[in-house]
Amino acid sequence: MAEEVKNRYSDEELAEFKALIEEKLAAAKKEYATLREYVTHSAANDTDDTSPSFKTVEDDGAVQLSKEEASQLAARQYKFIQNLEAALGRIENKTYGICRVTGKLIPKERLLRVPHATLTVEAKEAMAKH
């Protein structure tokens, strides 16, 4: 008997993806808030000026970021948050994991690595060639 071709992920699989995305979303929002706070931190002359505000590597010492770098990271993080929230919307309407170009199911392994993906690797590579 031929294996049935799935045209969407099951509700159980969608629930797994939803939990993963919600976890990543919470972490992304926390990091975004930290970056925004750093970027908008006032230049008061108190002890906060000399203490590292943002650590890029935990326990390996603090690396102070410039406000420009932090602003760029915050913008990227904001876009990531929007992509994750859009993925949650696709889960709700049961279109999550379907390639927007080919209509094929995006492999589960890809979605576990890039939960906001909307393209199969093949579709993404084909688009990059054009």
Image (spheres, grey):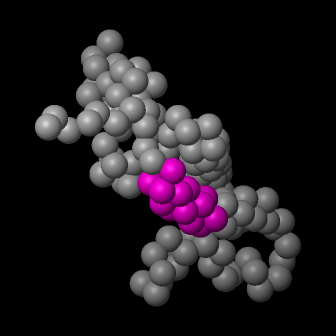
From this view, report whether residue 50 is shown above or below residue 2: below
Res. 65 in view:
no
- Residue 105, given in percent of the width and then of the height, sits at 36, 35
Q: Is the magenta stretch mostly helix, strand or loop?
A: helix
Taking depth in this image into account, of 82 and 34 the one nearest to the observer is 82
Q: In which quarter of the image is residue 24?
A: bottom right
Q: Residue at x 55, y 39 (%)?
A: 94
Would you say 74 lies left or right of 9 here? Answer: right
Direction from residue 110 to residue 13 in the image, left or right: right
Which quadrant holds the N terminus? top left
- Whether residue 54 is situated above or below residue 24 in the rendered picture: below
Quarter of the image with the C terminus is: top left
Residue projecting furthest to the front? 1
Decide whether residue 36 is among the magenta residues.
no
Instruction: Look at the image and give the residue range highlighted in magenta.
Output: 11-28
Residue drawn at (45%, 75%), measured in percent from left and top? 57
Tell me what residue is drawn at x 28 percent, y 33 percent: 5
Q: Where is residue 90 in the image (x, y as percent from the top left)?
A: 58, 39
Q: Give the quarter of the image for residue 36.
A: bottom right
Q: Is residue 29 left or right of residue 9?
A: right
- The residue under the point 57% across, 44% down is 91
Question: Where residue 78 sits in the image (x, y, percent)?
Answer: 65, 48
